[in-house]
Amino acid sequence: MEYSLEEVMETVNMTLYHNFDIRTVTLGVNLKDCIDSDLEVFKSKVYDRIADCGKTLVLEAGKLEDKYGIPIINKRISVTPVSLIVESCPSSAPLEIAKTLDRAARDAGIDFIGGYGALVQKGMTKADARIIDSLPEALSCTERVCAFLNVASTPSGMNMDAVVRLGSILKEISKRTENGVGCARFVAFSNAPEDNPFMAGAFHGVGEPDFSLNIGISGPGVVRSVVEKNRECDLTALSEIIKRTAFKITRAGELIGRELAVNMGVPFGIVDISLASTTKVGDSVAGIVEMMGIERMGAPGSTAALALLIDAVKKGGAMASGNVGGLSGTFIPVSEDSCMNDAVKCRALSIEKLEALTAVCSVGLDMIAIPGDTPAETISAIIADELSIGVVNGKTTGVRLIPVPGKKAGDYVNFGGLLGETYVMEVNRFSPRDFILRGGRMPSPITSMRN
């Protein structure tokens, strides 16, 4: 793949003036061949593999940052879902592996390591149940470990027994971590992609090679700048402008990803073209929507504007690369997006409107602070509502809710760093208890019968 001088100069300008960056390079690592009947030997193998791979990833990524001048914000690793590698181990194994992953990531300089989780959309094994039960302790005694559960899919429906358990588990994680921030390292999924480079939901899928290098790019500041320059054009023309911009962003990202994979001697996986916000001013997905002409994110028209945005981004990305994958959507994390946060503060944006927005983007209810006294069954019901959108529409959706101890609707909370700050959102006070506690499994929709 060849790149012109003009493309290189455009990338330099995007980096210097519009916050363009490589949000993450994520190395997928197979751990199945590390399994050993001796838990200490098992842990040693896992540590050595993660530490060695992690150090190489950090070193080679740093070289490319220097070479191209494009920031690579996070260096991450995703591993085989831990439930699959502890099946034959003692009950203490999941937590021991979590601690080992955390220690190896820390020693290698890796920012986050994902894969502590299970795929339970149709039922749970004993190992799956152990993983779920260990989540509060695993996320409170580690700093870099990220966890996931895929509890629903279009072919299988939704495992409501798992969803019911999550409500109380999230409340317990919240109690054990400052401001409930441990919940920010856990995501519940429907239709989880196996090649997602973004945390907290990244894991190395069963159908993947031993190693794969996935890259997540982000350029909301770049897209916002071109929208700002084209305030008068109609929506057809605006879509084309955004599409061309996404093409350029994707080309730049794939250049970095492919070269990094070659330098590490591993296969290149995918480039995820998601627009991911940061707390920087101007680096906001909600800001793009507002620049399109919506007075405040959450106002009527927000869903249509977001739909146009993500469609154009996906078309541009698909045109630029044959290796687009992962989530490739728009992230709308409340605490990590300054304009989203402002919309919550002035009550333009509610959880119900956020849920509507997720019908047209690929991520879901993300980084939402809710009152600490929210009942467990209400938390489970919010998860079920959101994941139902993914199941019925055959798309990925996820949920990161943070019940903040001692906080009520309207209170301010600061999670620190990239996790940002936000205002606690109001939750509908009427109870779903009798429905949620029925449990069982919601059947797959008729749309799943495509074969």
Image (spheres, grey):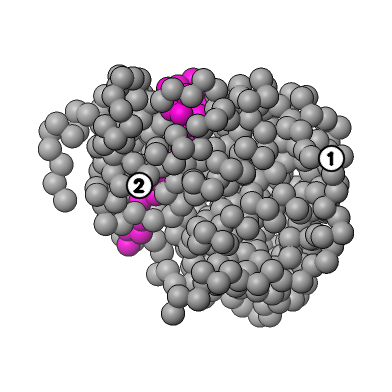
Q: CA distance from mark 2 to mark 1?
A: 37 Å
Q: Residue at x 39, y 61 (%)?
A: 212
Camera sees residue 284 = no
Residue 5: where, in percent of width, then height? 12, 33
User: Quick check: is 93 in the magenta stretch?
Assistant: no
Look at label 1 and name its amino acid: Arg
- 112 to 22, vertically: above or below: below
Q: Is residue 222 left or right of residue 302?
A: left
Mark 2 secondary-structure assignment: helix
Q: Residue at x 44, y 41 (%)?
A: 307
- 343 to 384, vertically: above or below: above
* Quadrant where the C terminus is found in the figure: bottom left
Q: Nearer the viewer, residue 179 or 230?
A: 230
Look at label 2 and name its amino acid: Lys
Residue 197: where, in percent of width, then height? 46, 51
Q: Residue under label 1, please give it.
A: 429
Comes first in the chain, label 2 or label 1: 2
Q: Residue at x 31, y 57 (%)?
A: 323
Q: Nearer the viewer, mark 2 or mark 1?
A: 1
Mark 1 secondary-structure assignment: loop
Residue 400: where, in percent of width, then height? 65, 46
In which image quadrant can residue 239 be found? top left
* Segment colored magenta: 267-291
Residue 424: where, in percent of width, then height? 74, 30
Q: Nearer the viewer, residue 244 or 444?
A: 444
Q: Nearer the viewer, residue 110 or 280?
A: 280
Q: Residues within 10 Å of mark 2 (few under 14, many from 20)?
A: many
Camera sees residue 339 = yes
In which image quadrant can residue 131 be found? bottom right
Q: Residue at x 79, y 43 (%)?
A: 174
Q: Residue under label 2, please give it.
A: 314
